[in-house]
Amino acid sequence: MRVAIIGAGWAGLAAAVRAVQAGHHVTVFEAARTPGGRARALALPLPDGRELSADNGQHILIGAYTDTLRLMRTVGVAPEQALLRMPLALTYPDGAGLALPDWPAPLDAAWGIARARGWRPAERLALLRAAWRWQRSGFTCAPHVSVAALCQGLPQRLQREFIEPLCVSALNTPLHEASGAVFLRVLHDALWRQRGGSNLLLPRTDLGALFPGPALRWLQARGAAVRLGRRVRALHATGSGWRVDGEAFDAAIVATAAHQALHLQVGADASLPAPAAARVDAAWRAWQSAAAALRFTAISTVYAQAVAPVPAPTTAAAALLPRPMLALRAGADGPAQFVFAHDQIRELPPGAPPTRVLAFVISDSRGERAALEAAVAAQARAQLGLPVTVLRTVTEKRATFACTPALARPPAHVAPGLAVCGDDVQGLYPATLEGAVRSGWQALDALDAPDA
Ligand SMILES: Cc1cc2nc3c(=O)[nH]c(=O)nc-3n(C[C@H](O)[C@H](O)[C@H](O)COP(=O)(O)OP(=O)(O)OC[C@H]3O[C@@H](n4cnc5c(N)ncnc54)[C@H](O)[C@@H]3O)c2cc1C
């Protein structure tokens, strides 16, 4: 088949790789000049004239992202080199919090909870009991239950220092609005399913080099056409396939974010008999109404540089933070939930002075830029003891869909020969790279799915 894929984010690229593997002739259309969508590289100029290859937002992968890791290997990226792997640690600058040992699951989680620092024995016991309850229920709950309801009765400190950062980083949705069922699924896959599932995997390269760049090269080397800077406007069913802006294909996969797909003009070619055309129109209208009902939440990443009085370290090994990634106490004191030390994650060119760049991540971000930056600078001073200069703030207003209870996400199948993929399409995961990749993998099957 000639397959058109519209969008070269992680979902579209996953679909393209799978389509090429299945022997199809693939054409990828991407509106932007670079691939990667919401997980892409961007240049960060430093005051000393250097330019750092940073990202539109600090991303964390976890060991449970098995399809993403497999896909990276397919296109020639070795996750062992491209990602810094560490056992899960949700520790704060004062050392409080949870750090798992490198043991098989779920022993690692049980030991980590039992040994968590700064939590009273009764609090640790309460979390172990809750974990036991969730395990006995098969990590499932009724669809309408929120994370707040699921965790009702857990001590306040655990909610604040464990559940809240986990929930907001995985679902980008506050506790009282977040889906308990999706939260439990993530907990299960990360903490229970396999050894290393909860490991944190921090990209050692920029996100472009981590997957989208190698994927494009892999596709092109196998004859796929890649059209960057090409925004698709219209798709029309012809009876034997689909026209994408007038160009004929046997099938099309829309891999844009759901809200972007709402701008596409989708309908039937004049040659299609009226009843068939009406079915296409109705199917697209139904898909649009599900997509239009999604709400989105923002993520801000404040890139800042630690300044004096921190003595300028001479090597990257002189660490700014006790770990490459720390949890922060978000609230009145400051908006960021996590901070990442660039020099402790990325490899600097030999002999290059450290950058002292920190990335502060604000999930479910709501503030204005200037206020966020001032609050992050105050938070860095108060919680890390580091004076910082803000370099750049990136806010992705529609970073992810709000992962609320009983959410009806738009389906993957629209009409014969037309499928949709993306992190916001029906699936088991919240809006994550793994969710996007899984959806892309499944897009080809959705082309042939029966009509609803
Ligand atoms: C700041 C931030 C931090 C995040 N952190 C994490 C994290 O730590 N861990 C994690 O797993 N996930 C994280 N995510 C989520 C993750 O980035 C997304 O789930 C994933 O990138 C979504 O990929 P996608 O392919 O579904 O959609 P997108 O990346 O949105 O791709 C859609 C593509 O379609 C293109 N397009 C749109 N319209 C058209 C058109 N008409 N014609 C052609 N092309 C078009 C767009 O340009 C885009 O490239 C984060 C997201 C953000 C924004």
Image (cartoon, grey):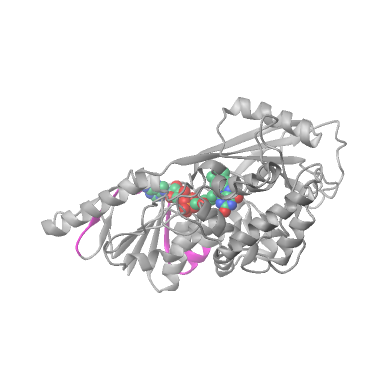
Check the image and report above or below for 107 versus 6.
below
Using the rendered image of the protein, determine whether residue 21 is visible from the camera's viewpoint: yes
Quadrant assignment, res 68: bottom right
* Residue 273 lies in quadrant: bottom left
Q: Is residue 289 above or below residue 380?
A: below
Residue drawn at 19 percent across, 57 percent down = 279
The reply to whether residue 229 is in sight is no
Relative side of 270 to 384, left or right: left
Residue 439, horizontal then vertical, whole percent: 45, 60
Closer to the camera in the image, 182 or 147: 147
Q: Give the magenta range.
A: 217-239
Number of marks in the image?
0
**171 relative position to 222: left or right:** right
Q: Is residue 135 left or right of residue 87?
A: left
**Residue in the picture at 77% in, 57% down:** 114
Q: The C terminus appears in which quarter of the rendering?
A: bottom left
Closer-to-camera residue (135/17) = 135
Could you say which is closer to the camera, residue 92 or residue 431? Answer: 92
